[in-house]
Image (cartoon, grey):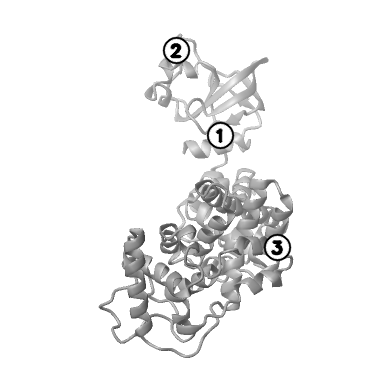
Amino acid sequence: MEKLMQYIWQHRLWSLSEMRTVDGKPIRIIDPGILNTDSGPDFFNAKIEIDGHLWAGNVELHTRASDWKRHNHDKDKAYDSVILHVVEKDDAPVYRSNGELIPQMELKYAHDFSSKYADLVNSTNSLPCATQIKNTPSLVIAEWIQSLAFERLQSKTERIKALYDTFCGSWEDVCYVTLARNLGFGINNDAFERLAKRTPLRLLHKHCDSMLQIEALLFGQAGMLDQDLYPHDPYYQQLCQEYAFLANKFSLTPMNADAWKSFRIRPQNFPHRRIAMLAHYIYDGFRLMEAILNAHEEEDLRELFCVELSGYWSNHYSFGNTSSFTPKALGNSSIDIILINTVAPLYYAHATINGNWENAERATDLLETVKPEKNSITEMFVRAGIKCDNALFSQALIQAKREYCDTRKCLYCAIGHRLLSQAAAGK
């Protein structure tokens, strides 16, 4: 409830046109202050006129006035700067550590506001505002989408920045791990990232003139090679022998094979083919980041990921059984996913780290031209009446669902804020 009170105070959503302290002195809120997300009073640097006298200082909010003493604020000098104590229920006077009485007022707000908030945060619907979001003005939606899209890009950038620091500024290493992670297409993301970090690019580059050795290293480190399996598959057995030699030479330890998931995945999306695709990029040296930066058109980028697998993987989805001839590693929709989750974030991170803001524009331009993702999240918003025209939009909707809807942070969502503001105004 205190979070709700803080929100009302911050956004001036109180219902009283005339405010008074609990002992009847008139109050005028000139500036409610700045919300404090750390320890100490709830709002800093407020300006409040009480009974004709202007005060500058901090504001503390509680559901009950008696919480002041319960939280030991009466003994804490950090709260001596409080000029107004705002409560929902006045059940006790409050004092500073030196015994001075602190002005106190009860915060009144529309009953509809509280019930609307409860309806949103307690909703069993995955999208709490599903029945109301379609009535939100398009301008509000557009501004919120833009904000969410950049919020999501920024969160991906933070992950890339961490890799950049880990690899001492090597963009090809950053690109290698980022691409590997996103070849997991959600269900195997973490496993692919672990594989890339466990099989560093510097090791693979030592053997980049041999596809057999690259694949042996990747499949071996993935925990997918065991000589007792597929005894009648010559290529598999060759990989096992090659990995045994390399693992002994470089003291390598493979992952647990249980890390990989194939249940309910289409055969063409099995992790084996994605690992084979990764091997394709490493053969002859991994220079994908350079190619991404030098690509000038979306079609140039698509060309980078229109990979055809040769040899064993042109007619295998996994080890053992031969399948139909399917050399193409990724379909068009999968390439879209790579552009969205690998290329655009790499452009944006490169821009923020190097100050080249042309690449930031390339990131947003790319997202605005690529088709939107079609998944349960975007479909949920579409059913609620929100159009999803491109990848920038779909990324924003994913951010909204995961960071606001799932956590019920309706107070911090532009849509939720509008609905609650309307309730506070009696609309």
Q: Nearer the viewer, mark 3 or mark 1?
A: 3
> Which residue reaches farthest left?
228
Instruction: Please give left or right for residue 108 compared with residue 350 in the image.
Output: left
Instruction: Name the residue type under label 2.
Output: Ser
Q: Residue at x 51, y 40 (%)?
A: 4
Q: Secondary structure at mark 1?
A: loop
Secondary structure found at label 2 = loop
Which mark is in front, 3 or 2? 3
Q: CA distance from mark 2 to mark 1?
A: 28 Å
Amino acid residing under circle 3: Asn
Amino acid on which disc 1 is placed? Lys
- The residue pinned by badge 1 equals 108
> Around disc 2, counting alpha carbons within 10 Å, would you say few (fewer than 14), some (14 to 19), or many (20 or more)?
some
Rounded to the nearest angstrom, the CA distance separating label 3 from label 2 is 65 Å
Residue at x 58%, y 25% (from the top left corner): 44
Residue 160, numbered circle: none
Mark 1 Cα-neighbour bin, 10 Å: few <14, some 14–19, many ≥20? some
- Asked which quadrant contains residue 235, the reply is bottom left
Callout 3 touching callout 1 (CB < 8 Å): no
In the image shown, does 341 or 404 lie closer to the viewer?
341
Residue 280 place in picture, x, y as percent: 53, 73
N-terminal-most mark, 2 or 1: 2
Q: Which residue is mark 3?
A: 294
User: Which badge, 3 or 2, is on the more N-terminal residue?
Assistant: 2
Asked if disc 3 and disc 2 are in contact, CB closer than 8 Å, the reply is no
Q: Using the image, determine if residue 119 lies above or below residue 46.
A: below
Measure the alpha-carbon separation of dots 3 and 1: 59 Å
Q: Is disc 3 placed on a helix, strand or loop?
A: helix
Q: Which residue is mark 2?
A: 97
Q: Nearer the viewer, mark 2 or mark 1?
A: 2
